[in-house]
């Protein structure tokens, strides 16, 4: 049994930011199921959006771009507060040592889809890698922070584990979590005054995703099982351009490339985006992804193509070194050849519902980052607002937690994890097959374009998978792959049910049985 003032589940920008701020007031545990560097933040290429040039840009423009992308479902007040804090938060990262790209002595500001101005601060095309490495270094060197790598948070501890029933959901409290240590197979009880879920997204629910293997929706699923409110799960953002080479594992081709002037072409070399939106390649991601999906289905093609061959070759190599080197590794010189791309699951706009302070519907439980639904993104996230959201809400959550944690007692009478009656089972094929089946079902039926019929088929298949895996889970000794699959099935259920409930197309949720909603949703 471990006790801490703050328990942080997840090691991306949101979790590490919270940990650093909270560690100035109390003890912090950071639990991460792989190495601490392995988080969605690490793979963020584009950058962080923020108004840094007030001669050409303004808070009002950034706010409006965010609201337009969100298709009427953003919380305007929350968006306004976040946008106005962006310059300060970006400068704070710079004070930490993050080295953003500069030109002529000034921050180089990129532009991406949905943005009316150049306002994306970046570190070449590997912004997430730069930020994550700096934050990890600071966390590792802080005396009040203990990092638990290769530890998997399995279950939130609530009154349920004390054998108590609560009459109202708002009476539920979180006391910490059961955490599985990979090397020993032991389940530890980690108790805290305040628990923070910052466990990232769930792109692995889909067959094709830009997310790393860790993105299995663990935080959302845990919170759902603990009866936290979950919101907007139908809004899954598909990044329009992932590298369509099987060996590349859906490597992300940053939207910044289109912001730099890259053109989308079909297999005949025709630039097609003007057929779908007057903003062409700079339209919001949902529009571009649906346009590509439409081209692929109409033409029977496997890819569309991103063209930067008309640009200065040396500038491309300098501005996008990671993309250039990665594509070259797979035999494509982007300065002279088109890049084959397709959409892939990328970001969850929904998640655990929170207020502006990161407070969930469960007492003593906060959430921030992609795992949370804060009201900022609405029905579609504006490009490069994700790292900004992580920074802003980590700070909001830390301010709230640090103000109250000393008044909260640690609940020490939580029983140890009970695995009596279970047995070891090496039937890995059952887990791997069910995982692949779930991913295929979600891609085919709950992807970029949906229908009532597809959603009905999806829920039937999801139900069967749920019953099989729950039976297996209840009889078998716990493993991380089994827990991940269980979480993925829970997240899939939440996506499907939310999609079935929304009887209109809006933002990222496009159902062919309903017209696209153009009014405030």
Image (cartoon, rainbow, N blue to C red):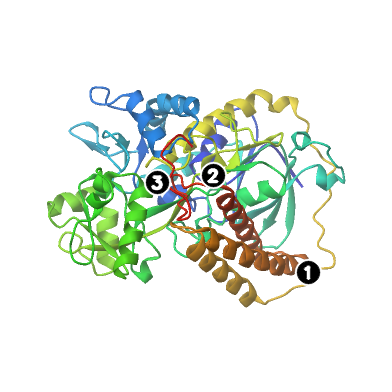
Residue 456 percent coordinates (x, y): 59, 62
Residue 79 percent coordinates (x, y): 45, 29
Label 1 secondary element: helix
Label 2 secondary element: loop
Between circles 2 and 3, the one closer to the viewer is: 2
**Above/below status of 26 relative to 480:** above
Q: Quadrant of residue 61?
A: top left
Task: Tell me the distance, in whole angstroms, between the alpha carbons under discs 2 and 3.
Answer: 21 Å
Task: Tell me the distance, in whole angstroms, between the alpha carbons under discs 2 and 1.
Answer: 32 Å
Labels 2 and 3: the sequence-earlier one: 3
Task: Tell me the distance, in whole angstroms, between the alpha carbons under discs 3 and 1.
Answer: 40 Å
Is 252 on the left or on the right of 510, as rendered?
left
Q: Which residue is mark 3?
A: 128
Q: Nearer the viewer, residue 361 or 442?
A: 442
Labels 2 and 1: the sequence-earlier one: 2
Q: Which residue is mark 1?
A: 475
Labels 3 and 1: the sequence-earlier one: 3
Q: Which residue is mark 2?
A: 350
Q: Are marks 2 and 3 in contact (CB under 8 Å)?
A: no
Residue 478 percent coordinates (x, y): 71, 64
Q: Nearer the viewer, residue 230 or 314?
A: 230
Residue 188 percent coordinates (x, y): 74, 52
Q: Are marks 2 and 1 in contact (CB under 8 Å)?
A: no
Between circles 3 and 1, the one closer to the viewer is: 1
Answer yes or no: is residue 477 visible. Answer: no
Q: Nearer the viewer, residue 179 or 137?
A: 179
């Amino acid at each position: 049994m471990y006790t801490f003032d703050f328990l942080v589940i997840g090691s991306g920008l949101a979790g590490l930011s919270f940990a650093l701020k909270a560690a100035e007031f109390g003890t912090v545990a950071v639990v991460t199921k792989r190495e601490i560097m392995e988080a969605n933040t690490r793979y963020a290429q584009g950058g962080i959006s923020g108004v840094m040039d007030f001669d050409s840009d303004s808070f009002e423009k950034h706010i409006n771009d965010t609201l337009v992308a969100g298709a009427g479902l953003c919380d305007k007040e929350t968006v306004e507060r976040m946008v106005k804090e962006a310059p300060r938060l970006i400068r704070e990262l710079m004070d930490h040592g993050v080295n953003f790209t500069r030109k002529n002595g000034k921050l180089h500001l990129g532009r991406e889809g949905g943005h009316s101005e150049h306002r994306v601060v970046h570190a070449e095309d590997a912004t997430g890698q730069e930020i994550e490495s700096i934050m990890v270094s600071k966390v590792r060197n802080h005396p009040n922070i203990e990092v638990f790598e290769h530890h998997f948070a399995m279950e939130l501890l609530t009154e349920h584990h004390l054998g108590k029933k609560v009459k109202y959901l708002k009476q539920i409290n979180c006391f910490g979590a059961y955490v599985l240590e990979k090397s020993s197979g032991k389940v530890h009880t980690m108790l805290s005054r305040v628990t923070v879920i910052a466990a990232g997204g769930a792109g692995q629910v889909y067959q094709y995703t830009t997310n790393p293997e860790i993105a299995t929706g663990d935080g959302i699923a845990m919170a759902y099982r603990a009866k936290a409110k979950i919101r907007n799960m139908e809004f899954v953002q598909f990044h329009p351009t992932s590298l369509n080479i099987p060996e590349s594992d859906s490597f992300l081709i940053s939207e910044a490339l289109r912001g730099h002037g890259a053109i989308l072409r079909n297999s005949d070399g025709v630039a097609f985006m003007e057929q779908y939106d007057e903003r062409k390649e700079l339209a919001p991601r949902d529009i571009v992804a649906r346009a590509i999906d439409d081209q692929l289905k109409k033409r029977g093609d496997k890819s569309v193509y991103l063209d930067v061959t008309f640009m200065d070759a040396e500038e491309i190599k300098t501005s996008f070194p990671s993309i250039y080197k990665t594509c070259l590794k797979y035999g494509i010189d982007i300065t002279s050849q088109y890049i084959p791309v397709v959409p892939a699951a990328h970001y969850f706009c929904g998640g655990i519902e929170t207020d502006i302070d990161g407070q969930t519907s469960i007492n003593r439980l906060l959430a921030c980052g992609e795992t949370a639904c804060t009201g900022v993104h609405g029905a579609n996230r504006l490009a490069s607002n994700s790292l900004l959201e992580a920074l802003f809400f980590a700070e909001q959550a830390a301010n709230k937690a640090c103000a109250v944690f000393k008044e909260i007692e640690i609940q020490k009478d939580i029983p140890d994890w009970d695995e009596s009656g279970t047995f070891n089972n090496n039937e890995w094929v059952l887990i791997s097959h069910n995982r692949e089946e779930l991913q295929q079902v979600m891609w085919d039926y709950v992807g970029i374009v949906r229908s009532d019929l597809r959603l009905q088929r999806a829920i039937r298949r999801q139900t069967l998978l749920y019953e099989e895996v729950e039976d297996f889970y209840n009889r078998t000794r716990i493993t991380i792959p089994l827990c991940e699959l269980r979480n993925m099935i829970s997240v899939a259920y939440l996506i499907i049910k939310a999609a079935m409930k929304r009887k209109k197309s809006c933002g990222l949720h496009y159902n062919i049985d309903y017209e696209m909603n153009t009014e405030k949703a």
